[in-house]
Structure formats: structure tokens, C-alpha cells
Image: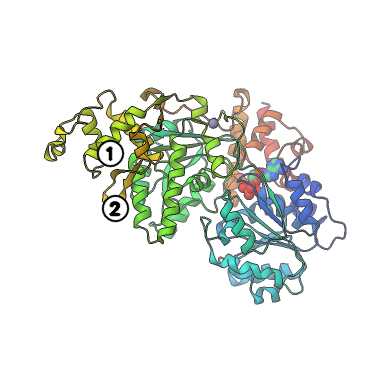
Amino acid sequence: MEAIESIDLFSPQRHERPSPLAVLRDIFGHKAFRGQQADVIEHVAEGGDAVVLFPTGAGKSMCYQIPAICRPGVGIVVSPLIALMRDQVEALEQAGVAAAALNSSLTQEEASEVRRKLRRGELDLLYVAPERVATPGFANMLADTQIALFAIDEAHCVSQWGHDFRPEYRELIHLVELFPGVPRIALTATADPTTREDIIERLGLEQAEVFTTSFDRPNISYSIVERDKPREQLLDFLGGHKGESGIVYCLSRAKVEDVADWLSGKGIRALPYHAGMSAELRSANQDAFLKEEGLCLVATVAFGMGIDKPDVRYVAHMDLPASIEAYYQETGRAGRDGQPADAWMSYGMADVVQRRRMIDEGNAPDEVKRVEHGKLNALLGVCETASCRRQAILAHFGEVYPHACGNCDTCRSPVESWDGTDAAIKAMAAIYRTGMRFGAAHVIDVLVGKETEKVTRFGHQHQKVFGQGKELDTRAWQSVLRQLTAMGLIVVDHANHGALTLSEAAHSVFKRERNVTLRKDRPKKSVEVRRSLARSVDVPEHAKPLFEALREERLRLAKAQGVPPYVIFHDATLKAMALAEPKHPHDLLNLPGVGQGKLDRYGDAFLAVVRGFEG
Ligand code: ADP
Ligand code: ZN
């Protein structure tokens, strides 16, 4: 409650508005603007429209929250999910900002209370669902209210090309007529150029200033491993993340249950999440993920949108995602707090077959299917690249990353390449000679000269190619076939049970008009994941006991209020606290993430913990 007082200085009735920098420092406890935040905020605070295309974790929320606080009136924020609104409102209240949400989860009384506050001009920020905003009813309700701005969060929801299309977002175009003169700011972490253009058009923001920045997420370390024993590989990877929160994505519900069970059996606290579970169980598991520390959530892609948890330390993919966009989006949920985080994927040929089948069995029009196959190919390119993964990902979004990143697996331990032209010709000959009707396993048996039942049944032991590939083992051939698929020389015929066929382009290799360079897969030993790529919040040894004690205090305070620990303080703040050992409230204020509101609320509790440590 005390916290509200300090904010009253900035209440909407006051004539003197605080400066953006003052709000950043005093309320949010940050010391300086990041990247282009200051430009966006200035532009919007002065009444301009803006389109903000920043990656996850860049700090988009500040871009509308600060102008909303600085401008007279209430900032209306359109948000697609109730969970998202709740998170944001909670975090703002913790900082002492007058914020509320209006959505279907409120009781009649709660909703009337919010409306009352709105009428009295007591709110700085109001979060609402898209279907509510652009209606005459809502406009009536706001008739006598001063509006600071409209923020359209997750703006890619307006586009069919994006990954979370929400038809209600299309109605937002009417905000222009309903509320002329009120600045609008649309924000998204979408990197895909088609979706970006669509957003601007669909929201009528052609005149708005567009702010973009690099989509690189420097704190995320990428690695993609060849699938061997996927669960053991996963376990090994998780070994580097003990006590940390993370997400493990699986393609199917059954696999989610399976992997979660298996991990639990291995002593890892893992919970499942997929659309086939009851709503209660799903939300209980999501809640546990947000509010506990060190939980592994095993999920289908049904989980993730609207999860703003800043301290997700890893995202693991047990199956190939649908596209680079999806991969970027899903891995992007790691490390929102800017601290080191790991993105890890295991993949094999079976993924390619499965993904192709999913596309073909879907009921999208042919044109869309072609695009989806193309997107999958682009992702395979990233999986099979012998150079920097980050460069490959960003290149897909039209961004040139000027040098090898040093923070992906291929950069850390460079892969060698070799002239695979002969191998490619043999592999493709084996496919051709066996009638382009068989999957990878059989083709490899033919290459290495294995007389299986299937081989003899089809008489393939009499083919000239039979046993012609003995110089490579099965695993090496798997790699060759995967890479040739990624290059588009081999095509998987999903309509025919994943049979391998040849593309037009294969001819030029047969005729030796082009060479094929392949990446040399790592010897098995080094495929194992390096432990602890991201010993996340790496607190020096001497400060660890205090850091842990501060974490305990945070968890206690969080539980008492039923909020996630990170809305109280981020790990980075606790780390700084453990190092600085503050004695006085003003020492606390100097730490990143401590503003006046949080000082008032939690200063004493944390100072007491620090004092207790002086022994
Ligand atoms: P986005 O919406 O772009 O994914 P958020 O708005 O959630 O990003 O911000 C990501 C994190 O960065 C949050 O924890 C926020 O507190 C922090 N942050 C934002 N702006 C700053 C800043 N100027 N200085 C320090 N931390 C910041
Ligand atoms: Zn790299």
C-alpha cells in the first residue's frame, strides 16, 4: 500500500508529467534506456503512432508503459491472452503503477470496480481483450475518459501469416475512427517480413514510424545434435541446468506424457502440458511452472504463447519444429531476462518424414503446402549447416550477422566438411536403382550390403550398388541422406510412407556438373552436450550462500501473495544484491530492478536477510 504514495506524484490529475527517464528509474528501477526504447517512448509520448519490431526480451513493454504513465489519461493495452494481462498487471502493481485488466475472468463486481476506477481517472494502464476494444460500447464507456494511447501488443495476431492469428485483431482497424487523434503503438517480436508488412496494413499504420532492431538474441546459445539416444541426450543436456526452469517441446501429446514420466523417474521435477489434458490440470501445471523454481515443463507447442516468465533458462526440442520462424519463436522463450540461456534440439531423418506427412495430410490449399515445405527445407538448412547457426537463422529473416557468433555449437566446435560427391552419387544411385520406393533404412542396408529379409525379398542384393557403400557405416549414411535431403537433392515422398525419391537437381550431381560438400558429423563422444553452456546466473562462489538466502526470501514473499517469484525481483537483481551486500535502503535503490515501489514493499525484508548474513 505504501507503494501507491510514491506514484501519486504521477497520478493523472497532476499537471506536471514526469519525464520518461524519471519513470524508468524511479518506478521500474532501471538505470538507462536500452537500444531504441528512448526513441520510441519519446515519439509516442509526443503523440506519434509507432510500430515496434523488437525481439523478445528487448523491453517492448516499457515502450508503451512509460508513455502511458507520462501522458495524461489511461493507456489502453490490447492483449490476446488473459494470462498475459494478469502477468503484466501483477508486475505493474508490484512496481506501484495503477494498472488493471478488463476481461472475461473478472466477476461482475470486479469489472464494475475497474470501470469505476477508469471513470475517475485513477488508472495509468488498462489491459483489455481485442474483441472488447473496437466496439461502440467500449467507445461509449470511454467517452468521458482521457486516453493516453492504444498499445496493440502481440500485433502479429492480426496477420494470417503469423503463428497466432486472432480474427478479433482485425477489428482494431476501427480504433482510428472511434478514437481519432489518440496515438497507437503496435508491438511484436515477429521477424518474418511478410507478417510485418501485413501488420502495418491490417492495422492501418502506414503513417506510423517503424522501429526495428536486430533480431539476434545474443544470450541464447544454439545447439542442434544428431539424434542418437534422444532421452539420454536430453538427460545429459538437463544435467547442465539443475535447479533451473526450462521447457522441453515434443511434437505429440503421447510423447509429452512419456518424456515427462521418464524424466520424473530420473529425479527431475517435470510436468506435462498439452491440449489433451483437462483445463484444470493444464493450468495447475502452468502455474507450478511460473511459481516454482527449477521446474521442467514438457509440452507441445500448445504451451508458450503468453508465457512471459523471464528466467526460462533452456528450451529443448525433442522433435524438429515446423519452420525457422517457429524455432525462433519457441527458443525465444528462453532468457527473456537477458541472462545466458540454452536452445537445444535433437533431430533425425524421421523428423523430416513426419513433418512432411503432417504438411501433406493437413487440409491447407496446395499453395500453402508448398510454402510450408519450403519453410521446412529452410529449417533443415539450419540443422545441417557447417557454419554458424545464428548467421543462418538471422539470414532467413533477411538480416546479415557480420561474423561467426561464437555462441552456437558449430562456432564452439567447428565441423569439418568433406567432398561428398561420390557418396551422394552412390546414395542417389541406390535410391534410383531400388525404384524410389523405400525409406532411408532400406536404402542404407543396400549401400552397406546387408542381406536383410527385405533386401532378398526384392532381390536388391543383385543390384550393382549393393554393398558399394561399405566405406561408410550406417550412421554416416544417415547423415549423408539427411544432408542430401536438406539440399533438396533427395525428396521424401510422404504420400508413399517416406520413400526417398530424387529431385530434378540430382541430375547435375550424377553428371558431375556440381560438387556436393557435406558436413562431417562429430564422432559420437563429442556429440554429447557440453555441460552447462549457460550456468545461467553465475554467481561467484563467495556470494552464493547469500544469493540462495535471498532467493528463499523471494520465494517466501511470492508464495504469501500467490505471485511468481520473478515479479518481486529478477535473478539479476538478487545477484547484484548478493554481491553488493546493501546496508541501507538507498544502497538497494542503486541496484538494477529496484524502484521506489519495490523498495517500499520489500526493502526491509531483503535488507534483513543481508544483515542476517553478516553473522
Ligand atoms: P519484450 O516484451 O520485448 O519481450 P519485456 O518488456 O518483457 O520484453 O522486457 C524484458 C525484460 O527486460 C524485463 O525483465 C524488463 O524488466 C527488462 N527491461 C526492459 N527495459 C529495460 C531497461 N531499460 N533496462 C534494464 N532492463 C530492462
Ligand atoms: Zn555461431
**Residue topped by disc 2:** 495
In the displayed image of the protein, which residue is found farthest to the right? 16
Considering the image in quadrants, where does the C terminus appear? top right
Picture quadrant where residue 441 is located: top left
Identified at 47% across, 52% down, the residue is 303
Mark closest to the chain's N terminus, 1 or 2: 1
- Judged from the image, the quadrant occupied by ligand 1 is top right
Picture quadrant where residue 584 is located: top right
Identified at 48% across, 24% down, the residue is 413
Residue 348 appears in the picture as rendered: no
Q: Is residue 581 above or below residue 258?
A: above
How busy is the neighbourhood of tag 1: few (under 14 within 10 Å), some, or many (20 plus)? Answer: many
**Identity of the amino acid at label 2?**
Ala
Identified at 71% across, 47% down, the residue is 601
Q: In the rendering, at what x and y percent does residue 169 appear?
A: 58, 65
Distance from disc 1 to disc 2, alpha carbons, whole Å, reads 15 Å
**Residue topped by disc 1:** 440
Residue nearer the viewer, 600 or 165: 165
Residue 541 appears in the picture as rendered: yes
Q: Is residue 104 above or below residue 511?
A: below
Q: In this view, does 529 lie above or below 304?
A: above
Is 597 on the left-hand or right-hand side of 424? right
Q: In the rendering, at what x and y percent does residue 585 appear?
A: 77, 38
